[in-house]
Image (cartoon, rainbow, N blue to C red):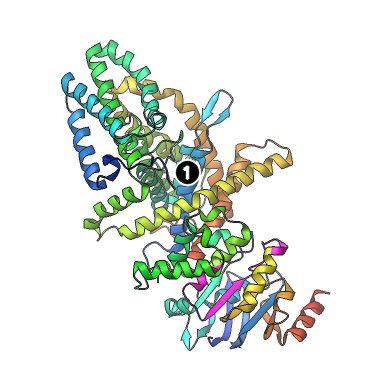
Amino acid sequence: MSLIHFEQVGQSFGDRTVLHDVNLTLTEHRIGIVGANGSGKSTLVRMINGLVTPTSGAVTVDGQNVARHAREVRRKVGFIFTNPDNQIVMPTVQEDVAFTLRRRGLSAAEIAERTAAALEQFGLSEHAEHPAHRLSGGQKQLLALAAVLVAEPATIVADEPTTLLDARNARRISELLQTLPQQIIVVTHHLHLVEEFDRVIVIEEGAVVADGAPAESLAAYRALLQ
Amino acid sequence: MTDTVRPITRSRSILPARDLAQIAIFAALIAALGLAGPLNIGPVPITLQSLGVMFAGAILGPRKGTLAVLLFLVLTAVGLPLLAGARGGIGVFTVSPAAGYLYGWLLGAFITGYLTARLLPKYPFWLALGATILGGIVAVYLVGIPVMALNLGLPLWTTLGLNVAFIPGDLIKVVLTVLVAGQVHKAYPGLIARPLGRQHP
Amino acid sequence: MIGLYSPGTSLIHRAPTLFKLLLLSLCVLLIGTSSDPRIVGGAAAGVVLLFLIARVPPRAAVAQIAPILLILLVAVPIQGLLSGWTVAALMAGRLIVAVALAALFTMTTTVTAVLEAFQTLLRPFNRFIDADRVGLLVALTIRCIPLVSDIVREVLEARTARGTQGSLLSIAVPVVVRSLYAADALGEALIARGLDD
């Protein structure tokens, strides 16, 4: 579990302001972030592992400024993207999981062992040697999860992890995310995914407009949609 | 496509992750175009692979474009059948009559990229056309023809004569490359770093 | 990715890659500079013997050598007329032998083994080129080929669905733009997964 802190965070691309004056302290186990398309929520969560550096203010993870300690922070924070196809970087399933473990001073045997364990956990063992692009959409997202969890991060950030999946695979991935022991921060349009979470934050036009227990936050969000 | 957030923090390496990804994607594009087989425009068969090489220079610029072509060639050399007609292996780089064209692609991508970088951001059509002909045709033939003459033991002019048939197809590819690059650079600025000393506001 | 490799357990399959590569270069050099019909003839016999030892499928072997024959079909008559039929025959023989040898190397060596050999050859130049990064880039590109092929296929399908033939431009622009977006997303994933850490 990490302590993630946003202090007066602002972000603009050119003359377009995406986020302004965001102050947040995230310590809960399961946190949902909801908001309309273009509300700035994707940018917000990308700041947690340094994929985007805020133009003003600072984001810290366990007291470390992400902009200065991106490497240390990324070892603690794993990231799941919307499109599983774009996060597969190696030709075969097994190589893709092993990619995460490079440059960590592990022996080849250790890497093989941990890779096999991660594949086993997500039911991908029989596909270990298969080309990753032949997996189904749901399996690809499982592979992405395996490739992140093999590094044993304390926190997982997921940006709309179920948006591109069919209903059955979306449910499977949501169930998996709900049961992970890691701290998890999920951006989603599938509101039921975060109904049981510890905290839900609503982002609207680059600012936090509701923040609290899921029932209240989601009610506020639904009111916004009217 | 979901909304991707473009500005990425620069990494410490000489080639940032985004450049690396663009190089790999364009090397893959050259391969994919070769696997797609030739396209017929009227009587002229167009092999799309060399189109991919022109794209690499005109869209990614001299550094990334040349590296993309080099990477594609490495993949071919290690034995992947990625050259049009499912050819590959080290033979195509050494003793094959067409070996020179592969090195010509490298020079061609570099020259196209180098000149394109100087034509941006305006990218005037006729100058771009000239630049792409120079890189995509002249440079490629400049290396390709002598190597073919050498490997076949034929005189230079005879070899050139054997290759004239490919020039109309190449010209079509050049025009297409300039039109595509023009649209892409407008929709997606900043792909090619401007040469030093010519920074625009 | 198996590529042009044709699996087997022959002596040639098992020989160390760098040794095969060295031998190949020497033979090609020797044959290429020789104008003695006996050397070229002997080399041709040697190559046939090597193919028999390696027992690669004849069809695969022919597929690699056939394109050269097509070119020779044009080049040999020209050369015969220009500089005599002996010279033409010698040139054709040298070329076929060299191409066949190179094809044999490729067919008996796995992609991984060739890549490792290349990386070994790059080690002395570590100051200029990071051999591991080259290997990584090659693997990344192999992964990208189906990704880009899917983009090409989807753009072509979208065109068919609209029922318009459309110009080449209307295919090429979306292919390139979508490829660039895929590269952006892939770049982000590489950073998130610790490429440079």
Q: Which quadrant is the N terminus of chain B positioned in?
A: bottom right
Q: Residue at x 53, y 36 (%)?
A: B175
- Which residue is tagged 1? B30
Q: At which x and y percent is residue A202? A: 70, 80
The residue closer to the viewer here, A165 or B123, is A165
> Judging from the image, what secondary structure is the residue with disc 1 in?
helix
| Three-letter residue code for mark 1 | Ile
The residue closer to the viewer here, C122 or C16, is C16
The residue closer to the viewer here, A207 or A132, is A132
Q: At which x and y percent is residue B116? A: 45, 47
Left or right: C18 in relation to A140 = left
Q: Residue at x 58, y 86 (%)?
A: A8
Rendered image quadrant of residue A14? bottom right
Left or right: A200 in relation to A140 = right
Q: At which x and y percent is residue B23? A: 44, 53
Does the segment drawn in magenta span residue A157? yes
Left or right: C149 in relation to B19 = right
Please, is residue B23 above or below residue C54 in the view? below
Residue A193 in view in this figure: yes
Q: Which residues are magenta?
A: A145-168
Q: Residue at x 31, y 60 (%)?
A: C130
Q: At which x and y percent is residue C11? A: 26, 41
